């Protein structure tokens, strides 16, 4: 399927097979037999709690970590079998950005961005032209002569991104690239990463603790726990039908569209009618007409947002018809929507599960 939200193509550019990486003589199994294909043009989010193995897995891609076993192929080249010379070439094709930017504070912004080009022995004039182009692309053309300490966090990350793009890599690895930034700056940096994917066709693998970063930027996601990938797939599908408890927890904290048990109790106390949760899905109900329910209804909780540029979320409704009218309304709704019935004060909630993410 062609994905409008990214430039994903169906052709794997990164292929990890059977990767295991241990530390401390095998006492710590950071990554445990993980296989993962990233397609050219993907923005692939790797999400998990601290210590899940995300950084180790991603650092295997550019051989910052060497796996104990398994094979890494990037753009047709076997990273795990490469000698030092070939590894240098492969790394030129893989940019990386970091949570704390990792800039040289004693060098100007322009010198930081031009550093990989200097290493690659580009002539001075060509280097200056490329740096000017990159400064312009990331939106800090006026900061060329500044030093990193004179910049805001967002500007520093733009320098990090420009430096990572200097050698026109096919792949960009982003390790918690927005974790040190405030929400507004995070949005700006995510917008920039989206442009890098769409306009330059760069494949991005992004490590994060935040499902909202995944929701706003990625087309695919892998959820890691204990060194393994416990769930993976298209972001929309994983958000719509999460299977693993860790995935559910990440989604609940990012979307906050469904009432928790405590919220449900409060809603029951303040609303005497029947409460139902209706999920909006691009593949089914992308909107619904309250007046078509045939009973008086109010929206009492919920959130509708976008995932991969498609409508996503759920609304909790209070139905205020008779018991029979409410039941009939729910049956009609179920013909085209996921409905979870929370019941009312008199009737325990029948377990239906479908929309119970
Ligand atoms: N160089 C190392 N030496 C010893 N143990 C390590 C090393 N690097 C990682 N680990 C351990 O491997 C496990 C996975 O770490 P990793 O940094 O990959 O997780 P993570 O999911 O990226 O966590 P975080 O979100 O905190 O960065 C942890 O238990 C960590 O302590």
Image (cartoon, grey):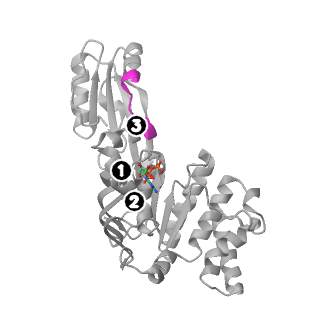
Which element is circle 1 on?
Answer: strand
Which residue is painted at 65% across and 79% down in the image?
Answer: 130
Residue 27 sits inside the magenta stretch: no
Marks 1/3: CA–CA distance: 17 Å
Image location of residue 355, percent across then percent down: 28, 36
Q: Can residue 280 be seen in this view?
A: no
Q: Earlier in the sequence, mark 3 or mark 2?
A: 2
Which element is circle 2 on?
Answer: helix
Residue annotated with mark 2:
57
Residue annotated with mark 1:
224
| Closer to us: 344 or 133 | 133
Identify the image quadrant of residue 325.
top left
* Mark 1 vs ligand 1: CB below 8 Å: yes
Is residue 3 found left or right of 132 in the rendered image?
Answer: left
| Closer to us: 19 or 333 | 19
The region drawn magenta spans: 253-263
Residue 257 sits inside the magenta stretch: yes
Please, is residue 72 above or below residue 24 in the view? Answer: below
Image location of residue 19, percent across then percent down: 31, 63
Which labelled disc corresponds to residue 76? none
Count residues near mark 1 (Cα–Cα under 10 Å), then give few for <14, some for 14-19, many for 20+.
Answer: many
Q: Can residue 79 be seen in this view?
A: yes
Q: Earlier in the sequence, mark 1 or mark 3?
A: 1
* Disc 1 + disc 3, Cβ < 8 Å: no
Marks 2/1: CA–CA distance: 10 Å
Looking at this view, name the residue that lies furthest to the front: 25
Residue annotated with mark 3:
252
Please, is residue 314 above or below residue 208 in the view? Answer: above
* Disc 2 + disc 1, Cβ < 8 Å: yes
């Amino acid at each position: 399927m062609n994905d409008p939200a990214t430039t994903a193509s169906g052709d794997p550019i990164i292929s990890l097979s059977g990767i295991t990486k241990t530390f401390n003589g095998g006492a710590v199994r950071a990554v445990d037999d993980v296989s993962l294909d990233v397609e050219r043009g993907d923005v692939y989010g790797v999400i998990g709690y601290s210590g899940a193995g995300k950084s180790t897995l991603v650092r295997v891609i550019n051989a910052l970590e060497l796996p104990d076993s398994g094979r890494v192929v990037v753009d047709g080249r076997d990273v795990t079998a490469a000698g030092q010379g070939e590894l240098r070439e492969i790394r030129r094709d893989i940019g990386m950005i970091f949570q704390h930017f990792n800039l040289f504070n004693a060098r100007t912004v322009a010198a930081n961005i031009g550093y990989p080009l200097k290493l690659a022995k580009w002539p001075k004039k060509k280097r200056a032209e490329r740096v000017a182009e990159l400064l312009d692309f990331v939106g800090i053309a006026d900061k060329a002569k500044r030093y990193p300490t004179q910049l805001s966090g967002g500007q520093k990350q733009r320098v990090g991104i420009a430096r990572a793009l200097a050698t026109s890599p096919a792949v960009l690895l982003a390790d918690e690239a927005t974790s040190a930034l405030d929400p507004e700056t995070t949005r700006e940096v995510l917008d920039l990463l989206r442009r890098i994917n769409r306009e330059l066709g760069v494949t991005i693998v992004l490590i994060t603790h935040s499902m909202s970063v995944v929701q706003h930027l990625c087309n695919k996601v892998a959820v890691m726990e204990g060194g393994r990938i416990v769930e993976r797939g298209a972001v929309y599908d994983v958000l719509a039908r999460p299977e693993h408890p860790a995935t559910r927890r990440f989604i609940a904290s990012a979307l906050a569209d469904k009432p928790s048990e405590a919220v449900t109790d409060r809603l029951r106390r303040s609303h005497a009618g029947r409460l139902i949760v209706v999920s909006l899905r691009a593949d089914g109900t992308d909107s619904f007409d309250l007046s078509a329910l045939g009973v008086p209804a109010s929206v009492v909780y919920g959130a509708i947002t976008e995932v991969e540029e498609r409508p996503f979320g759920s609304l909790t409704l209070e139905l205020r018809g008779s018991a029979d009218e409410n039941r009939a309304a729910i049956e009609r709704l179920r013909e085209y929507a996921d409905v979870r019935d929370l019941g009312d004060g008199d009737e325990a909630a029948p377990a239906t599960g479908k929309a119970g993410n």
